[in-house]
Image (cartoon, grey):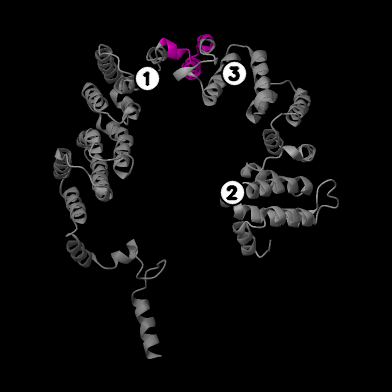
Amino acid sequence: MARKAATTTAEKVKPAKARKGSKTTLSEANLVDLGPERLAAILLDLSIDSHVKRVLRLELFAEASREGLALEISKRLATIGKSQARIHWRKRVAFARDLDLHRKMIERLAEEDATAALGLMLDLLDMATPTLNRLSQTEGPIGDVFLAARDGVGAIAAQALPDPVALADRIATLLRRDDYAQFGPLVNALAPALGGKGQTHLRETLEKLLAARATRPPSGFDAKSAIYKDALRRLADASGDVDAFEATFAPELRRTPLVSAEIARRLLEAGRAEDALATLHAGAPGEQRGRHQSSLEERAAWEEAMLDALEATGHHEEAQKRRWAEFERTLSIPRLRAYLKGLPDFDDVEAEDQAKAVAKRFPQFDRALAFLVSWPDLMAASRLVLARAGEINGADDTLMAEAARRLEGAYPMAATLLLRASIQYVLTYGVATRYAEAARQLLEAESLSAMIGDFGEYPDHQAFVADLRIMHGRKQGFRAELEALGSAF
């Protein structure tokens, strides 16, 4: 009792701090309670670790003076930059941690001296290629540090207000040394700091570099020229110069779907809709072969731009015809929605019915099912499943599972047929990675069987399972998954 009373009195004198968790949990609040002297002693003991020591030194310089911090960072970057030794894979994490420490300290320095911080961040970026050359593979934590520096330098430049011509020269130098094609986004990040004068200087510099490379004997793909052209395109976008953007592409490339769509997008934004339409017609998807053959994604990008160009030039009916034709070909829901939105009032109901009729007779069952389930028209989806049950392909586990889930409440027979198709596919082809899923689906089909009064031409659940045992009774992996769920096979 005395001890309890004493404790109560002490608590009245010095209330305990509210904490989340135990007093021994590593947290800022608990560490503060150790006091500055104790923490300083602990950190000094830990400073035998080189990284901890470097952190502490940089923190001390940050508190003492910004000039000292800048000098310390500069010295460390210079040391790293001079080394040419290979970086062993076991040391990559530690190297990246050290590099990232200095990147973060540069960002901290920017709060007080943005000009010095900008120079140091550009110095850090200048180390990217020689440092990555010391690795057996560039992907990983070290490369991530340089990407973080690239993405953060724009904010520092906005504070530093550098000389635009000098900054343009630094960017050009980085691009010349960019053996890993990392620094294109620098142009976007630093375009505001460059201003008109700096952008013009950088553009002229890059054009001279491109012209110099044009005098070289052709030897396949020129990676450096591609980097310079990409930078010029980014500069053109920054200044809104569509013609300069287009000029970076060879004439034959302008006549490809993807490039013509990119150019047309910019022409539309500039209010030059007729030019955009002409550009798209010149780059229409055809039967290109070789390296200019267009992919489905490129054709889709071209089609999207074409629809916008047609609307912008007053060719609404033609745009509507293209939308409907694309829907009939692909059952694209976005295309159908856009088509319906462009119809006069009350016409959309009849058009929607026509669209569902197209889906019901669509030759690819999976795509028809996906459309009717997603639109949604679950009654039509159920009828599709029952009418074309022989076409169900259980390979698409995502579609089968989602469609069955949507149908099971009101249309258990259709849901059951989808589940059965999925199960049969897994067992027939021995897809062991889907055994657990197939076991769950078999139990789902069992629960749905109680909701089905008449299986009609299809076997009931017991008969279905009996057939599975005959055909796949030796698949022990599937049996084990069922037993894990408390069932048997």
Q: Residue at x 63, y 48 (%)?
A: 426
Q: Residue at x 14, y 38 (%)?
A: 82
- Tell me which label, 3 or 2, sits earlier in the chain: 3
User: To which residue does mark 1 refer?
Assistant: 233
Q: Amino acid at mark 2?
A: Val
Q: Secondary structure at mark 2?
A: loop
Q: Residue at x 65, y 27 (%)?
A: 330
Taking depth in this image into account, of 16 and 98 the one nearest to the observer is 98
Residue 176 placement: quadrant: top left
Alpha-carbon span between mark 1 and mark 2: 48 Å
Residue 272, magenta (yes or no)? yes
- Tell me which label, 1 or 3, sits earlier in the chain: 1
Is residue 410 something one can see in this rendering?
no
Q: Amino acid at mark 1?
A: Arg
Q: Secondary structure at mark 1?
A: helix
User: To which residue does mark 2 refer?
Assistant: 431
Q: Position of residue 280 (x, y in %)?
A: 53, 13
Q: Amino acid at mark 3?
A: Leu
Q: Position of residue 364 (x, y in %)?
A: 69, 31
- Tell me which label, 1 or 2, sits earlier in the chain: 1
Left or right for 170, reference 348: left
Q: Nearer the viewer, mark 3 or mark 2?
A: 2
Classify mark 1: residues with Cα within 10 Å, few (<14), some (14-19) or many (20+): many
Is residue 416 something one can see in this rendering?
yes
First to last magenta residue range? 251-279
Q: Verify CB contact (< 8 Å) between mark 1 and mark 2.
A: no
Classify mark 3: residues with Cα within 10 Å, few (<14), some (14-19) or many (20+): some
